[in-house]
Amino acid sequence: MKFGPVPVEEAIGALAAHSVRAGETTVKKGTHITAEIAMRLKQAGVERVIAARFEPGDIAEDEAASRLAHILAGGNIAVEAPFTGRSNLYAASAGVLLIDASAIDSLNAVDEAMTAATLPAYKPVVAGEMVGTVKIIPYAIPEILLQQGIDRAGTGALRVAPYVRRSVSVVSTVLPGLKPSVIDKTLSVLGKRLEPAQARIMQDRRVPHETAALARELVGQAESDAELIVVFGASAIADRRDVIPSAIEMAGGRVEHFGMPVDPGNLLLVGSIAGKPVIGAPGCARSPKENGFDWVLHRLLADVPVTRADIMSLGVGGLLMEIVSRPQPREGGESEGEE
């Protein structure tokens, strides 16, 4: 593509690179300059305009944007018709956004003429939410360059994993002094978290904060119709040998990982029993504020695996709130609500 100032009479057939206002004549940016437009500009005293002229092999911005967007769109992603060199991508269903970050990085590294931007990977999204956008910077790019971008991007770099787990069983352990109202509020908060996934709490069980009692209950939940088990401890998990992880293992399950580099949310546990995922919720999960529990919960509701490596990669961006003023847990008694 040729770009730059040219005499008005030589701009016929090119695009106006910038808006031009002269007398009663206005030519908007991106307008194809016809012989009539050139004549009016000349009569208004305009001698030169900045124009863009396609060369053989160039692909117009809208077509290029659309081709790239369709290449990036994977399962449950809809592509909007392009405009001014931009094509947006939208979630076609509620779920968790999955992104091949290396593909996006590779595309963006090809040339400054092509850009792709997305929401953060693993973000919960709703149907109709914009999840990405492709923008072609100039009015056109060489097809050979566009093809390089397509090759680097691969196919389906963006997709939405729809929510598939709808039934959640909640087991709360209790200790003397823990008010039933605290558990009731916790269930209400969890119910709100489940709404975007159209999931529901199918069972609410309360047992003593003891390994054997909790293990017996977990065995029962593993045999139930629940697709996900969430355990809220009366006391936060302090060690892999604590009540909740020990009960999971006693019930025949396994602890995949304990602890996460997300704050609030450090004391989260993920495990499984009889193939069903189990979350040992951190104390902060009792609060409606975003915390590490949200990140893991929504992935599991969408049947997206959560491995130890996945959790340990969450540190960058994992500081979700200021914690300087948080009471120190070992100063004058327990303070577990945020972990």
Image (spheres, rainbow, N blue to C red):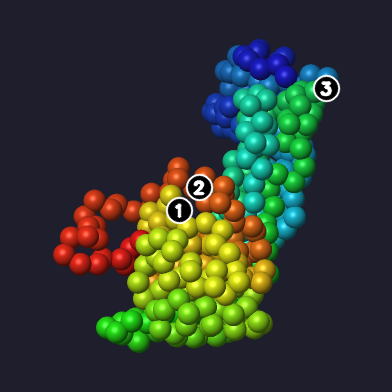
Please give the residue where the numbered disc 1 appears in the rendered image: 260
Q: What residue type is labelled 1?
A: Met
Q: Residues within 10 Å of mark 1 (few under 14, many from 20)?
A: many
Between 10 and 67, the one nearer to me in the picture: 67
Q: Is residue 43 left or right of residue 77?
A: left
Q: Residues within 10 Å of mark 3 (few under 14, many from 20)?
A: few
Secondary structure, mark 1, is loop
Q: Which amino acid does label 3 sit on?
A: Gly
Q: Which of marks 1 and 2 is nearer the N terminus?
A: 1
Between 72 and 162, the one nearer to me in the picture: 162
178 versus 31 height, above or below: below
Nearer to us: label 3 or label 1: 1
Mark sitting on residue 21: none
Asked whether residue 102 is in view, the answer is: yes
Please give the residue where the numbered disc 2 appears in the rendered image: 312
**Residue 219 position within the rendered picture, expressed as x and y whole percent measured from the top left:** 59, 80
Residue name at image x 64 percent, y 83 percent = 224
110 versus 118 height, above or below: above
Q: Which of marks 3 and 2 is nearer the N terminus?
A: 3
Q: What residue type is labelled 2?
A: Met
Is there a contact, CB below 8 Å, between mark 3 and mark 2?
Answer: no
**Residue 245 position within the rendered picture, expressed as x and y whole percent measured from the top left:** 48, 67
Residue name at image x 75 percent, y 24 percent = 145
Is there a contact, CB below 8 Å, between mark 1 and mark 2?
Answer: yes
- Cα distance between the residues tagged 3 and 1: 51 Å
Residue name at image x 80 percent, y 23 percent = 144
